[in-house]
Image (cartoon, rainbow, N blue to C red):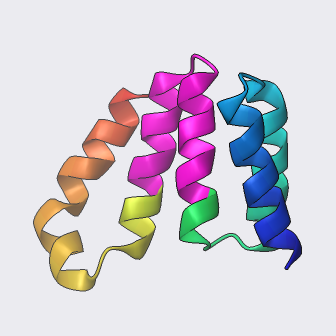
Amino acid sequence: MRVFAFIQLGSSYRNIGRSVSAISALEEALALAPGDWAARIFYCLALYSAGEPAKALKAALSYILQDADSATQKRYGEVLRGYLSDLT
């Protein structure tokens, strides 16, 4: 249940313009549940709101690559990894 509390807290912080606090809360959520899709998405949104659009997109692409099935990996994995390297 703690992970949900951190996700909700992070989302609330982001909604009131406290992006740094949002990122911190969502990093706690990700530490508790690294694979939680809601924590991942809200973390990306918080990064974007904090003025870090490239970092947000990089995180989102990384999460997509981690969860993509093997057919998707074969078809798009190399291209997405190329985009990731362009963002660093």
Q: Considering depth in this image, is 11 or 33 the residue closer to the camera?
A: 11
Which residue sits furthest top?
A: 51
Q: Position of residue 32 (x, y in %)?
A: 82, 71
In magenta stretch: residue 41: yes
Q: From the viewer's perspective, is 1 left or right of 65?
A: right
- Seen at 39% across and 50% down, the residue is 61
Left or right: where does residue 5 sit relative to residue 8?
right
The reply to whether residue 42 is in sight is yes
- Of residues 45 and 27, the one nearer the viewer is 45
Task: State how many labels appear.
Answer: 0
Query: Could you tell me residue 31's position as x and y percent?
Result: 81, 64
Question: Looking at the rendering, in which quadrant would you find the N terminus?
Answer: bottom right
In the depicted structure, whether residue 5 falls above or below residue 85? below
Q: Residue at x 81, y 50 (%)?
A: 9
Res 77 → quadrant: bottom left
Foreground: 7 or 35? 7
Segment tinted magenta in the rendering: 40-62
Residue occupying the far left of the picture? 75
Residue 22, by quadrant, is: top right
| Residue 23 placement, left or right of 52 | right
Q: Is residue 65 above or below residue 74?
A: above
* Image location (x, y in percent) of residue 7: 73, 58
Q: Position of residue 88 (x, y in %)?
A: 48, 28
SS assignment for the magenta stretch, majority: helix
Task: Judge whether residue 58 is colored magenta.
Answer: yes
Q: Is residue 21 above or below residue 44?
A: above
